[in-house]
Image (spheres, rainbow, N blue to C red):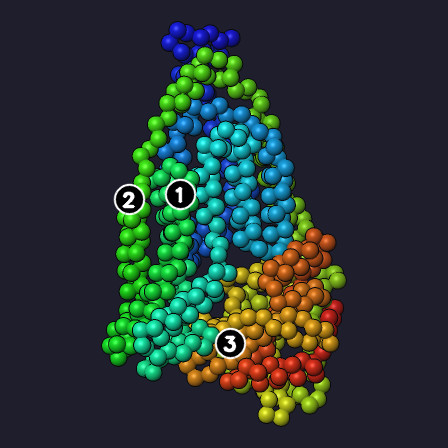
Amino acid sequence: MFSVTSRGKCMMGGNRVEGYPDWRLPAFLIIATAFFIALSFRRTLLELVHTWYASRTYSYGFLILPLFGFLVWTRRKRLLSVVPKPNLWGIPLLAALGLLWLVGNLGEAKVVQEFAVIGMETTAAWLLLGTEVVTVLAFPLAFLFFAVPFGVSLIGPLQDFTAHFAVEALTFTGVPAVLDGRTISLPSEVWTVAEACSGIRYLFSSIVVGTIYASLVYRSRKRKVLFVVAAILVPILANSVRAYGIILLAYLTDNRLAVGVDHIVYGGVFFIVIEMMLLTVGLRWREAPQSRPHEAGKAAEHSAAPANVLVPILKPLPVALIIVAFSGVVPATATRLWQSATAPRDALDLAISIAPPWHAVAAQDSGWTPALHRAEKEYRQAYQSGNSLVDLYTVHYSGQTGAELVSGYNRVENASVWTLTDDGFGVAAVNGRRISVQRTVVESRSVSREVWTWYWVSGEYTANPAAVKLLQAKARLLGRPATAVVITLGLDNQDGIAAERVFQDFLAHASFSATPVVPNS
């Protein structure tokens, strides 16, 4: 069947192998299965690409796949010296990732679905190619997860850090500054640390660049980790310094410089300079590429032991078929559960009634309401008791259309009119039961409002966005419609304590009850 020549070449079924394992079949199968996974979960991947396109924060995502290919190419010699062997221990992990995607799909958690699909792609590589190959490709495969647009929850803490740093720095340098939430008041101007000032875009770009840089310039794991940590900390600190510098420059020039579009331009230039300095300093500790004499020895070892070179033709095929079958079954299961959950039976809606002394009055202003997309039904009403006026706004989602209730596109404030200056959680009494509510303060040019928001999902109250998705997933897994309502109270406010007292009194006279949905005739 085979013979070993004196020059270290082996013949296998008429195919010549020049000192390296035969990679043709494994390479074909991993490319084919990766394509099939992408095809089966194409809606998830299309949403991922849409986020890259729609958000400047995540536009670097278009570079992840080309960079992945480059990282694999730089490891090609090491890769060719390893024998690909299927590893069935990847099957339980693949099943767990499929379940994770299913829960994320039923709960409309895009980031969970996206992480699960990327995890399936990397697990398929482990299943088909084995542990040795995945060890060589560990960094490129891990780098693929940067394709997922994650980290939105970091925006708020980054805004808070930037605001506190700027105020402390301004005070230290003799500029009078007062911080209220995320609003910085100076004698000459009022500044708000908005989301664009959080530095999240710079942070993610720095992490991606820093990770690639560390993998190419360093060899020791310690230096790689230290540089990536620096790539995380430096842009956070630099963004805070940038905010301080812009406010200081505007203050010293009586708002002639660093206002309007200027501060965005200055910020971009500042980030580029800082990043170049980081990379330049990092070169000081660069390490020369390691010579890998063991690779030649390993290749010779494979040649001397041709039995290790032989990759059974049929062995990878059943593994590939398992991956293909799994990739088809999971989305089909999700489709069936969605069809069962969107049936009109047992659907509930939320009804609201108010007892005296509170009574309904004409709503004066609707501009404060949350920016919620693809709402199926909304209710807006104002209520008054004495001199107290509370606005109520509810948005209803039947859970039958696939409209994502909690997402980066749905916001507490309409960003074109309002700026979110403070947020947190509080406790409110609804129907005599204490629940958690999200408390936010939004400001326009002339008005400050306190807003309380919470969700009603299939009969349960929560203010936690993650809990909303879990409750919706639970309902659909049980074959029930995942009806959800966003409940929002708004009040013009200059005193947070007074606002809380008014809201609590309003809720003490309000009754929220679940009612069956009457199908349209």
As rendered, which of 233 and 192 lies closer to the eye?
A: 233
Residue denoted by label 3: 441
Identify the secondary structure beneath mark 1: helix
The quadrant of the picture occupied by the C terminus is bottom right
As rendered, which of 232 and 72 lies closer to the eye?
A: 232
Taking 405 as reference, is 149 left or right? left
What residue do we see at 62% from left, 67% from top? Answer: 463
For mark 2, does the 10 Å Cα neighbourhood hold few (<14), some (14 to 19), or many (20 or more) residues? few
What residue do we see at 44% from left, 73% from top? Answer: 182
Eye-nearest disc, 1 or 3: 1
Residue 224's disc is: 1
Q: In the rendered structure, which amino acid carries the disc numbered 3?
A: Val
Percent position of residue 514, x then y? 73, 70
454 is higher (above) or lower (below) than 447: above
| C-alpha distance separating marks 1 and 3 | 41 Å
Q: In the rendered structure, which amino acid carries the disc numbered 2?
A: Arg
